Amino acid sequence: MYGYVGGIVKIDLSRNEVRSYDLPLEWCRSYIGGLGFNTKILWDQLPPNIDPLSPENIVVFSPGAFVGTSIPTASRCEASAKSPITGRFGTSNSGLFWGFMLKASGIDILIISGKAEKLSYISIINGEVNIRSAEHLKGFDCWSTADSLRRDYGDVEVASIGPAGENMVRYASIENNYYDAWGRCGLGAVLGSKNVKAIAVVGDKPISIANVREYEEACSEAYSRITSYPLFNLWRTYGTLVASDAYSSQGILPAKNFQYGTIDGWERCLRENLHKYKKKGISCISCPIACAHWVEVPEGGYKGLKLKDLEVTWVLEFGAKLGLTDFDKIMKCTEVASKLGLDCCSSASVIAWAFECFERGILSMDDTGGLRLKWGDEEAVLKLLEDTAYRRGIGNILAEGVKRASQIVGRGSEKYAFHIKGLEIPFRDPRGRWGVWCFGYLTNIRGGDHLRVRAPVELFKLPQPKDEYWLEACGVRREVIDQLDMIEEFKSRAFINDGEYINIPVMTVWSENLISIYNSAGICIRPPVLGTMGPTIISKLYKATTGINISPEEVMKVADRIISMQKEMNIAMGETRDEYRYPDRFYDEALPDGPNKGKKLDREVIDRMVSEYFKLRGWDPETGKPREEKLKELKIEHSKFY
């Protein structure tokens, strides 16, 4: 095969059995790879009503179709299972080098089922797969686990769980070596339930290219597009931290569990301060952007702390959401959470819930084991991270996630538990700047999250028109829209008045589809890619790499197929229309401060937008269930489960 290595490996831990299969060629055209392959596997093999922490759950890893090539940013690998935090289709994406090595081992899809009798790790060394005892790794943090396996095997790539995964914290992550992760949806808890401590992989199998000349031309075009993006150098310098300034200026920080949109001292967390900590940029394999930062604390109590950090998610979650306004304290929280194997967004959210409940007298020091919970106290944050990972004291409640934790505590604490569909929501307050991204928190297949939808063009500095929900202020030049790699049918409906506004429901469908293709092809979603790489260049790259001729329209239909299958699975797992809503605070309480003071969301209007979104997808506008004619159009065949 071209572009693919042609291998599926299924590990049945209960039987201590490893089986290999050939990758069906028809899957390549229908699902492309990565997220698409994972969706197909779970569609065929995962019963909807199982306990996510039972042996019946399945974990699937698939590198994107472009991983293993020199296509710019092609490093991403998707991991999927039924989520223990949401009870729905759970999926997460990670870069660096692990997915590359899995594919270099001759594996396009790795499936893990059952449960090992004792704690184990999986070694995949040049295609040879073994299940080995990990009793000596029990209790190790993720970084120590990677250290140990690298001493044994050399320069392997390691996916591992920490104490949080071993103790089945419902939002435990799978850490990707030391500085990346499959963070969201609790997939680390699923591996923990299967007694899998780690997966160590290395390989040297090359990727065969179907048409080298066309491939080189398409790669060159992709590289030129990405590096010519107007804000490329800004992203290369500051990475995602550019959002810290934007959110601060708009007053939409998640300050103190979304009580406020601003926070005193945040000027210390703006991008202009990055140079005091940053030593160099870091990139995933095959990436020209290098948006990540290698940082070091220069002074103070954490002097000498070094790691990859100060990306905006960590800064806003462990920072503004918890009242921390110093990079060094945020870096320490990042280090501890990464070692323990805890998802940043969920960890910060459940701790913020506990802080607000303590502030309001719902939780007392009797509940916290004598620990005083105070905004901006990193020692309290670090203690709760440890207690959560080991399920000690109140940490045993926090380990259940904010939805379940609030139900356990009761006493009105549910009012301060901020999640959508059971998944804790991250850092942007929708009240102050509504748009495609915030609407996407509701439509996201995996729940309240920011990484599966984003408009490919936006001018965030523009204020949103007052009381406007259907349109987002855009203001890009007509020539920018004309150059955008976007199917004309969508482009003509997504942009209003020559780009003055974006039609939010239409653009949400488009951008969800586009990012699903990215996660299937294995490329990054950063704006230099999102603003330049669409279905036309992706179809060129795919044809040149694999030899499979697929049109831009067919590329986007693959995404439509993937998302409709995921939606069908979610409904079978219990999802209802009522879950498509923000927590009450965002509708009932106006922002109390900042330039968008006084704004709040309108339930009725947003609910109508959800119906329109369902309609645009070919789903029932009331229930959200994909219509049979839509499934037939997408050539989705029912499995024995869905």
Image: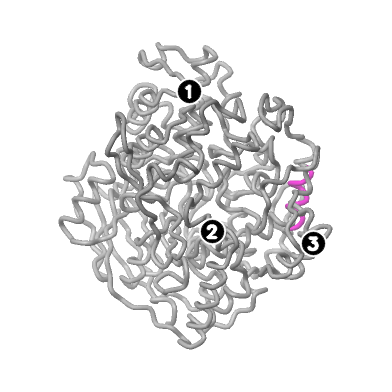
Mark 1, other Cα within 10 Å: few <14 / some 14–19 / many ≥20: many
Q: Identity of the amino acid at label 1?
A: Ala
Look at the picture and state if 130 lies above or below 612. below
Structural distance between the alpha carbons of marks 3 and 2 = 23 Å
Q: Going 61% across and 53% down the picture, which residue do you hit? A: 453
How would you classify the magenta stretch by its main secondary structure? helix
Foreground pick, 460 / 571: 460
Of callouts 1 and 2, which one flags the residue occurring earlier in the amino acid sequence? 1
Q: Identity of the amino acid at label 2?
A: Ile
Horizontally, residue 252 falls left or right of residue 289, namely: right
Q: Is residue 118 visible?
A: no
Image disc number at residue 525: 2
Closer to us: mark 1 or mark 2? Answer: 2
Q: Is residue 145 visible?
A: yes
Look at the picture and state if 276 lies above or below 21. above
Horizontally, residue 324 falls left or right of residue 19, namely: right
Of callouts 3 and 2, which one flags the residue occurring earlier in the amino acid sequence? 3
The residue beneath circle 3 is 493
Horizontally, residue 382 falls left or right of residue 627, namely: left
Magenta segment range? 608-616
Look at the picture and state if 185 lies above or below 208. above
The residue beneath circle 1 is 354
- The secondary structure type at the circle numbered 1 is helix
> Is residue 614 covered in magenta?
yes
